[in-house]
Image: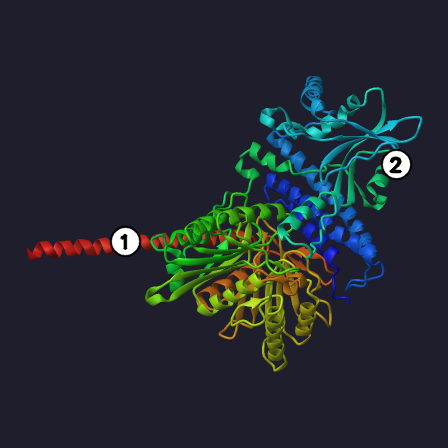
Amino acid sequence: MEYLENRELSLLKFNKRVIEEALSPDNPLLERLSFSAIYQSNMDEFFMVRVGSLTDKNKENKKKKDRTGMTASQQLDSVFTAVRRLQPIAEDAYRKNMEELAGYGFEHVSFETATHEEISFLELYFKRELKPFISGLVINDALPFPFLKNKELYVAVNICTKKGISVGIIPIGHEHSERIISLGNNGKRFILEEEVVLHFAHLMFKGCKIQDRAIIRVTRNADIQVSSKGTDFRERMEELVYKRTRLSAVRLEITNEFSRDALDYICKKLKIKNVRVFNSHIPLDLSYLYQLQELDDSPELHFPIRTPRKSAMIADNRSVFSQVKARDILLSYPFESMTSSFIRLLEESAVDPKVTSIKITLYRLARNSKIISALCTAAENGKDVLVMIELRARFDEANNIEWSKILQKAGVTVIYGPKEYKAHSKLLLITRKSTGGNFDYVTQIGTGNYNEKTSAIYTDLMLLTADREIAEDAEAVFSALRNGTFVEQTKKLLVSPLALRPQVLAMMDEQINISKNGGEGYIAAKVNSLNDKVIIDKLVEASQAGVKIELIVRGVCCIIAGVSEYTDNITIRSIVGRFLEHSRIFIFGKEGKEQKIYIGSADYMSRNTIRRVEVAVPIEDERLRKRIREMFNVLMKDNVKARIMLPDGNYVHMECRSIDEILNSQEYFYDEAYRRIEEKSAKQERMKAVRAKKETKKTARKKQSK
């Protein structure tokens, strides 16, 4: 279909938007370099997960096609071509920014630009600090090829012999080594460890003639499949996490020119084809760029410091539970603080003698998680604490396995959810005794993880409500998770895999019927990704019926907007900025009482709508509905970090006619959070002054009466 986009190519287009931020003059210089590091990290994950998956599919069924009519092999060919087209852009961004950084005293030294004294120092450094801790291995057909770890750096050398090809491999780094080797100017003049090992590699192979040398890096498949067989699920996950480190190579990156025969030999040993070899003229691991940020605090090199504010909706002098009981509360991250709101609620509940139970789903957590501490405290205080922790959260499996052990030791009941289905929901239910032997409930439903670190860099929304019907639905979700079953019907919540997509489609049908009957149908959504074919088909149907559709899709988007006769009434924007856009908002209907607004954990992807446990909640408080509508309108007006999709599937920046019309939505929301708390403080001061004035008058009257 001409309105469909291949998922993998769409994801690469997102990565293109990321690397464009590394070239944007709107971003401070060191922040631009951070976008280069983010781009590279994204590409690593893309190869590990998506290319890994396509590689497996190509082995399983070479003829099977995706919805765009491409086999796995054809998709791989298209992906490799697209990646090679992106590589010069990434290299150009890195070089330009590093050259500009020289104006601030930074200099990435090479052996061509190093002084004689520096070269002598580096030779001594190599012999004393590096060589004793690393070993060079000579490999030929008579010797086994060493296992090259995922994403680790190695130096490869082509050794000339009369007997055939021999290759030397040197691992980079050891327990006590430093990647950035300072050559002066407080670390701003530096060289990288791998460049030193590369230069002196011949000293590792004395008596051998080195013809070529290069730095190499292998990316391995990370698409592990969890079997439902066996007894202890956590033990199986621990085995799989180890197994992932041993999976097959899907990419080989290499710097410098290297002998074709020697490179072919390495590819043969890694069992990959040359099409999976990617040359690079910049460092293969750009994670060191984050360290450069710490070497210069010049304001013009960094984004302005932004600190999450206390929520203006939460008072300091009352428990959060009691405030939620009085009215629904909406929290917006990173603009508002998780610590002073959600974590405070958990910590208060952990020691509240009237709180009887806490139930929560956990997907990704911070390393020093205050959430875990609060849950352990609650269990130690005798409360019934149930934690559904997802051990299959990709790349967080090991962390979650350890957290599950810590929770169990504290007396928490730990469950893992249904087999074959990840639980990705962000759901909390707190039960508290009230007067007369009854119970009150606070339910929290969010779009983002319970993670203090990411809550400061991801945009997310969180609803806190005392609604009893929502609490009943939440209880049903936890009961199903505990029993390994699924919620089939709810009163208010949308819960996948059975009770989310049908309701979404039904609400879209309502808008289609409105348009067909001469009204103004409207559908809007903000999601991270969109690839659910059933939802895409319904959006096309809605567009053809005249429904106005506004979508904000950060990453993968498998529907193309503005295609004649199919998606004429659909506009799609993508926002890539300082903070990762992560909130999910669903809107059905024009503004008014009939409009339905939801926030939740699910994207419009089939993995979310029918293969995971996800939860979305209706926003029913009109104050909060108005706030979310205003937020969505601001996002639609962003003309700094937003790009709009064209009918050919490419993205261009939104036009800005004058400086007065510039709108960066993320900066706007931060300013709004500052303003809201300032207005609250000013209001409190005014009320305090009024109370003081009344007290003064009261005292004066008492004196007069005497």
Q: Quadrant of the N terminus?
A: bottom right
> Measured from the top left, where is residue 85 in percent x and y?
78, 48
Quarter location, residue 266: top right
Query: Mark 2: few, some, or many residues within 10 Å (few <14, many ≥20)?
Result: few
Query: Mark 1: few, some, or many residues within 10 Å (few <14, many ≥20)?
Result: few
Residue at the front extreme? 231
- Foreground label between 2 and 1: 2
Query: Residue drawn 69% across and 25% down?
Result: 133
The scheme the figure's colours follow is rainbow
Name the amino acid, label 1. Lys
Q: Quadrant of the C terminus?
A: bottom left
**Left or right: where 498 falls relative to 702:** right
Which label's residue is closer to the chain start, 2 or 1? 2
Q: Is residue 663 in view?
A: no
Tell me the SS state at disc 1: helix
> Measured from the top left, where is residue 325 in percent x and y?
39, 63
The residue tagged 1 is: 688
> Measured from the top left, where is residue 151 in percent x and y?
71, 40
Tell me the SS state at disc 2: helix
> Measured from the top left, where is residue 316 in percent x and y?
36, 52
The residue tagged 2 is: 260
Residue at the right extreme? 162
Q: Is residue 109 above or below residue 553?
A: above
- C-alpha gap between disc 2 and disc 1: 79 Å
Nearer the observer, 32 or 662:
32
